[in-house]
Amino acid sequence: MADGGRPPKRRWPTREANKGLTVRHRTSGVVGAIARFNPSQVTLVDAAGREHVIPVADGAFSVGGTTVSLVRPAAAAPKGPSQTASGSVPPPDRKARVARPSRILVEGLHDAELVERIWGDDLRAEGVVVEPLHGADDLVGVIGDFGPTPDRRLGVLLDHLVPNSKEWHIAQSVTHPDVLVTGHPFVDVWQAVDPARIGLDAWPEIPMDEDWKLGTCARLGFSGTPGEFWRQLLGKVRDYRDLEPGLVGAVEQLIDFVAPPPDEI
């Protein structure tokens, strides 16, 4: 053979990485439903609701016992949209830039997923990474560990940022000039999604001493886990018009703060 007798590279059948498809990662044994996919990595959600971010490689997964290579779903292929889900109009040659040292922190995983769904294109173009805090109680310590500077800014998005709430007091304690704390008035980021997307006139009223997610699922008659409900709700969100203006404005403000134009730095 012209290549010195080496066998040809093995090829596996391809499978479109449609959201919700259950796959097994052959190396780690992780089994889960696809939550997000791009050509370099896939996010799987296992039966316990845990997320696993796994690199994409040829023949790295199996579906129904068949080894496959995951590929971008045909319906999700780039089509050159006139605007992103956030409403911004990308230039024709817009590309992702190297990540900035600046960051945006959000309270939890659901917040991060919703921000990614609407502003993901903008964030990649600006090189801004969004990370979950998993609670804001130690925000001052997190800021100290991060070490903000004018070239390394930190934006923080908090839930339930209303006067005299716990989050409001936390925000008031942050005075660093290179940190911006903003937020929305809702107890949980679920409430920032237009309830009409799932056929509701309004989100149910949940007492403050009751877990909001569990209480909402119970009142809506949903028998699955909050994580399962969230995945269904997130799947209904199309663009910024499906969100409450309070959240949209807060996120836009944070992006402008951590990724200002060069003449504003």
Image (spheres, rainbow, N blue to C red):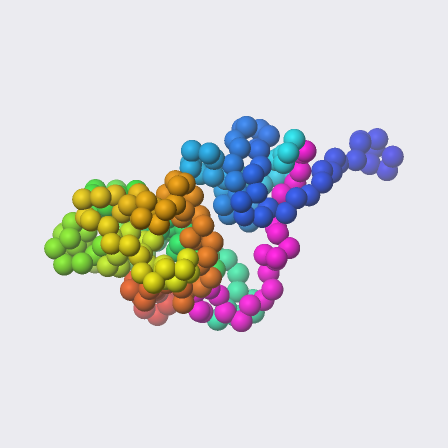
At x 71% / y 40%, what residue is drawn? 13
Whether residue 189 is visible:
yes
On screen, residue 12 above or below 236? above
Q: Nearer the viewer, residue 229 or 131?
A: 229
Residue 76 falls within the magenta-colored stretch: yes
Residue under the point 63% across and 47% down: 16
Image quadrant holding the C terminus, namely bottom left
Task: State which quadrant residue 255 falls in.
Answer: bottom left
Nearer-the-camera pick, 101 or 246 = 246
Q: Nearer the viewer, residue 198 or 31?
A: 198
Pinpoint residue 122: horizontal percent, then vertical percent: 44, 62
As drawn, 80 above or below 190: below
Q: Is residue 218 above or below residue 117?
A: above
Residue 235 x, y percent position in the rendering: 47, 54
Task: Tell me the quadrant of the picture where the N terminus can be found.
Answer: top right
- Mainly helix, strand or loop, the magenta region? loop
Percent across and percent down for residue 87 are 44, 69
Q: Which residues are magenta?
A: 66-88
Q: Residue at x 31, y 57 (%)?
A: 203
Q: Is residue 17 left or right of residue 5?
A: left
Q: Residue at x 55, y 68 (%)?
A: 81
> Horizontally, is 122 left or right of 70 in the view?
left
Q: Position of residue 108 (x, y in %)?
A: 33, 46
